[in-house]
Image (cartoon, rainbow, N blue to C red):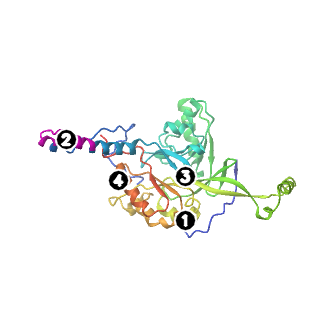
């Protein structure tokens, strides 16, 4: 059900395609191996001392366990939501919120996304939409209900043609409810949950999404009434409650930093959880380079931190050139400038300790 709704927000102040590293090889499964011991030469020079070997092994084992824990952690608990997924710039992005039965972008269609009933597509780059036919087909294979897929209106016809092409080539049914949801429109996901797109700024048409919880609150003028009097007015057709929308989770997809300064993004910037990109982390790819390719540099998030009122920020879409340790270091630096909890999504990235 699609309808119009006015959402009142606080009066906040006005607020390449990805450059792929040629050395990156995306692993289907990350397997950590213990690194070559940097202290081997020292140990050998000490006549293979058992004492030195024990110390060296203990240090190495501790670092190995620390790196492995960062790599294999699947889900992240943020403000009551278990958020998981994978987001590697230029390769694939799919972020899942099981509590809403939804996925943001579909990447290469990770298995966990198939069980999600709602899919929100931010834009048409393949690393965000490439797995759509597989997602729909796999749900059909397992006799799951047709999913509801939300897309920017500008790409709906192309998505319909894409699905029809796969139906023709595979001679299969691909059933879905395709919804073109425009910026400013509101769609009811269930009686206590709605979604609304907001404007983002990428190199092709794009939009983010905010999911709101819905609750009813008794109007102030009826607060003094007793239960029977309230029930009487309700039966007489008087609207006795206000609808309160609270932004819970916002997802930007690919965007430059302009959305941080857009007053229309105020709900995204006060949601409990903001899931946004930070493609570049160092001086090798500066802010100008990031903006040119429709992405953000993490320094821009630091620069505009005063507008960010989220309780938690999940950073995604890092360039594949970075290791987990690079990402963690950059996130820790940002944490000192942000009030909310900063967490990087590192699934799929290599540690310097991996083989």
Q: Are marks 2 and 1 in contact (CB under 8 Å)?
A: no
Task: State the residue position of label 2.
Answer: 51
Instruction: Give coordinates of residue 130: x percent, y percent.
Output: 49, 42
Instruction: Identify which residue is drawn at 69% across, 54% down.
Output: 215
Task: Determine if residue 126 is in view.
Answer: no
- Mark closer to the observer (2, 4): 2
- Number of numbered discs: 4
Q: Are marks 3 and 1 in contact (CB under 8 Å)?
A: no
Q: Nearer the viewer, residue 265 or 182?
A: 265
Which badge, 4 or 1, is on the more N-terminal residue? 1
State the mark number for residue 1: none
State the mark number for residue 79: 3
Instruction: Identify which residue is drawn at 12% across, 39% down.
Output: 47
- Mark closer to the observer (2, 3): 2
Which badge, 2 or 3, is on the more N-terminal residue? 2
Query: Helix, strand or loop at disc 4?
Result: helix
Between the residue at mark 2 and the residue at mark 1, the CA separation in whole angstroms equals 61 Å
10 Å crowding of disc 3: few (<14), some (14-19), many (20+)? some
């Amino acid at each position: 059900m699609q309808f119009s709704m006015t959402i009142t927000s606080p009066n906040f102040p006005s607020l390449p395609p990805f450059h792929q590293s040629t050395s990156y090889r995306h692993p289907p499964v990350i397997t950590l191996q213990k690194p070559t011991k940097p202290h081997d030469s020292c140990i050998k020079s000490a006549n293979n001392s058992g004492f030195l070997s024990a110390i060296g092994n203990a240090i190495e084992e501790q670092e190995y366990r620390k790196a492995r824990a960062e790599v294999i952690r699947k889900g992240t608990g943020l403000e009551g939501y278990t958020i998981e997924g994978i987001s590697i710039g230029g390769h694939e992005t799919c972020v899942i919120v099981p509590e809403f039965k939804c996925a943001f972008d579909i990447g290469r269609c990770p298995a966990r996304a198939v069980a999600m009933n709602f899919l929100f597509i931010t834009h048409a780059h393949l690393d965000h939409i490439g797995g759509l036919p597989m997602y729909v087909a796999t749900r059909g294979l397992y006799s799951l209900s047709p999913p509801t897929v939300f897309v920017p209106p500008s790409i709906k016809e192309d998505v319909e043609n894409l699905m029809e092409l796969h139906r023709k080539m595979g001679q299969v049914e691909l059933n879905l409810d395709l919804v073109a949801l425009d910026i400013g429109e509101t769609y009811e996901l269930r009686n206590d949950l709605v979604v609304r797109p907001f404007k983002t700024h990428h190199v092709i048409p794009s939009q983010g999404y905010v999911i709101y919880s819905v609750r009813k609150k008794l109007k102030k003028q009826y607060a003094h009434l007793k239960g029977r009097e309230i029930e009487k007015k309700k039966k007489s057709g008087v609207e006795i409650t206000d609808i309160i929308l609270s932004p819970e989770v916002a997802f930007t997809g690919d965007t430059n930093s302009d959305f941080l300064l857009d007053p229309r993004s105020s709900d995204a910037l006060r949601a409990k959880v903001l899931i946004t990109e930070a493609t570049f982390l160092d001086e090798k790819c500066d802010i100008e380079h990031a903006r040119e390719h429709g992405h953000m540099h993490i320094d821009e998030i630091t620069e505009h931190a005063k507008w960010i009122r989220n309780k938690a920020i999940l950073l995604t879409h890092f360039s594949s050139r970075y290791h987990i340790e690079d990402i963690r270091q950059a996130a820790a630096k940002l944490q000192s400038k942000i009030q909310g909890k900063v967490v990087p999504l590192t699934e799929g990235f290599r540690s310097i300790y991996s083989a």
